[in-house]
Image (cartoon, rainbow, N blue to C red):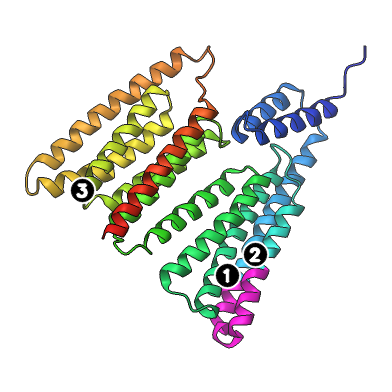
Amino acid sequence: MTSPAPGTRATDLATSLRRWVDRGLISPEQAERILAAEEGAAEETPAAQPASRASLVAEALGYVGGVLVLVGAVIVAGRYWSQLGVGGQLSITFGAAALLLATGIAAPARRGDVGRRLRGVSWLLSAALFGTGLGLLGDEVLDLPGETVALVAAGGTAAYAGLLWWRHRGVLQQAALVVALAIAAGSATAHLPGDDDALIGLALWGVGACWAVLGWGRVVAARNAAYALGGAVVVIGAQFAVESTWGAVLAVGSVVALVVAGVVLRELLLLAVGAVGALVTVPSVVGQYFPDTLAVPLALVGCGVLLVAGAIYTARLRRAAAGGPRAEGNPRVATAAAAGIAALVVVTVLVLGLGG
């Protein structure tokens, strides 16, 4: 029986991996590692070297082209922006976004190929320019208030970034979507009569918590990216609310939850996010309630000892479980949990915001 050619096997594997990632069965990082391992197992041929160099050159040229688009737009904005009028400004902004969108579409984004990275960067810049154009439209054309401009820009960018992420499940597209959702949630909260930084922080916290839970359940592909992005938004949102009593409790509880989740799930990334959150949260909370005492440095020392112990324990658990299957979250449980968190946060924000 004739074995398939190496090139055919690689193409079939790349196609299968792309399908599995789109279904959320594996993350893009896992797909790239699998493909790299399979390619490394095959004997390298001299003919592969020129193709690799050509790919790197194409990637570099794509990045340079994207930078030139941005630099050109910035130069025009600096020299002639006021003379262009609103129509010209919008044309340049949305035109640059469309050009970068087309660049990403044209990139051969095969799994593990440099074209995938080029597409991710191009579409990230496109989403940023699209949001800038929406903000300009709301401010200059529609003459909306600042909070409404931010809501329109962030909401529109979230929809745009969501479509790009649905088409290309890259980490950069996921980051653009999460950032836009968080800004939209905070902007919407700012419209409430009793809005304050604490409520805005709670809204941000809700977005981050939901995203991290969805990443755990594999509802969102690229679980590590979902942990990092969701955890970061949780910490940032809690910092907005830390001045209030319930916000301080939320901030400390969030850090503890991230650390505990990192230990239980054997995820060093979650533990790292929790450590950064502790570094930011503990001094501000302890200093707020115990000023001019040794409580802050002592609290930092205690947190440091606990985090080091948690890191060692987690590393040992990961090493002991290295030969066995990795614990996976349940998509249905994750979806239900995220929906419950979202509902609770929305109700709390509305009650406190309208009550103020």
Q: Position of residue 150 (x, y in %)?
A: 46, 65
Q: Disc 2 marks which amino acid?
A: Ala
Numbered badge on residue 255: none
Instruction: Decide if residue 187 is on the left or right side of residue 304.
Output: right
Q: What amino acid is labelled 3 in the image?
A: Ser
Identify the mark nearer the N-term, 2 or 1.
2
Pointers 2 and 1 in contact (C-beta within 8 Å) = yes
Q: Which mark is residue 97?
A: 2
Q: Give the quarter of the figure containing the C terminus.
A: bottom left
What residue appears at the point 56 percent right and 36 percent down from the top-left corner?
Answer: 222
Residue marked by disc 3:
284
State the image coordinates of residue 232 (x, y, percent, origin top left). 40, 44
* Magenta stretch, overall SS: helix
Q: Is residue 98 left or right of residue 194?
A: right
Q: Nearer the viewer, residue 201 or 107?
A: 201
Task: Tell me what residue is drawn at x 31 percent, y 38 percent.
Answer: 254
Tell me where residue 291 appears, x and y as whole percent: 9, 49
Span shown in magenta? 73-95
Mark 3 element type? helix
In this rendering, would 126 be left or right of 52? left
Whether residue 182 is visible, yes or no, is yes
The amino acid type found where label 1 is placed reads Gly
In whole angstroms, how far apart are the C-alphas of marks 1 and 3? 37 Å
Task: Identify the residue at image location x=67%, y=60%.
Answer: 100
Depth check: give the residue in front, 261 or 191.
Answer: 191
Q: Residue at x 41, y 29 (%)?
A: 268
Judge the density around disc 2: few (<14), some (14-19), many (≥20) Cα neighbours within 10 Å.
Answer: many
The circle drawn on residue 133 is 1
Dot 1 falls on a residue whose secondary structure is helix
Is tag 3's residue or tag 2's residue first in the polypeptide sequence? Answer: 2
